[in-house]
Image (tube, rainbow, N blue to C red):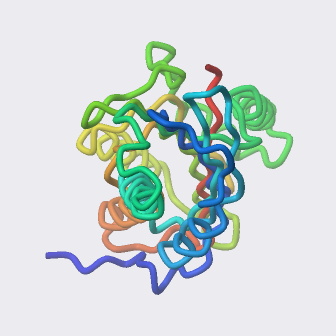
Amino acid sequence: MNAPIYTKRTCPHPTTQLHWNYSITWQTTPVEPMWLAELQKHCVVDGILVRDYQLLDPTHGVIMLDSRASVSPHSIVQRLRGRLQALLRQWNPKALAAEDEFRCTGTITRQVIEGFILQQRIQSATGVNDPGDRRFAEYCWDDPTIDLNRPSLSQNKHFWYNLHLVFPFVELECNLDDAELALVWQTLKNVSQRKQHWLRQAEIQSEYVHAWLRGQWTESPEEIALTYLNEIAFSLGKRKAFGCNYLVATESPTI
């Protein structure tokens, strides 16, 4: 078995922007969220930063939070709900209804991503950065049939888990030949199919590889990023083509 090249230890400081909303349904609505401070305190040890809570109407509320890259959406919901139920037990053990939703949010929207991608494609096509950039033009994937605004369903829960991934090449310069670039490209698509990720867009540029996708509920952002990095490295004969300072950020769907 191949030992991973990219690990949590070798990539300890990725750039992350992981923002979420957890929508809950109340059977009996608390007058004041007196549980919020306690929930915030308990969730920090789980790698979850509960930022705020808003009551939307008498039976619906939303918890706004950030997370570490090592925590999956499934774990976030499991820990949040479990800790909240424990805090509410003395008041009303059946306060929470079964219905809930979990969605990614933040400042990175579809429009931001598409604008970023379009700008990079124009630069590659015209050779603004480097005439050699034109060789990356063929490495562009765009599947409009994949609708990342539509929720996925797991264990009767609706969730939106859209990620923006950027893997910078070592020293921000692609030193791969055409055959190696083709390997990187095929591996990226193979991994997305095997892991059942919804790959909406992807591309290779002279400084980085970019992907915009829907992850699986049980996978953490860190796990997803490291899987792609390692699979590509193995396809290149264990060559470390990328730096360890990858970026992973949630994309806010248009609901």
167 or 165, nearer to the observer: 165
Q: Nearer the viewer, residue 112 or 153?
A: 153
Considering every residue shown, the one lying at the far bottom of the view is 9
Residue 224 appearing in the image: no
Q: Is residue 113 visible?
A: yes
Which is more toward the observer, 61 or 220?
A: 61
The image quadrant that residue 155 belongs to is top left
Q: Residue at x 86, y 41 (%)?
A: 128
Image quadrant where one finds the C terminus: top right
In the displayed structure, does residue 150 sit left or right of residue 234? Answer: right
Percent across and percent down for residue 200 are 49, 28
**Can you say whether 156 is above or below 171 in the image?**
above
Residue 222 percent coordinates (x, y): 46, 64
Q: Residue 123: where, in percent of width, then height?
A: 80, 36
Position of residue 228 relative to residue 230, above or below, is above
Q: Residue furthest top?
A: 145
Q: In the rendered image, which quarter is residue 203 located in?
A: top right
Residue occupying the point 78% across, 29% down = 115
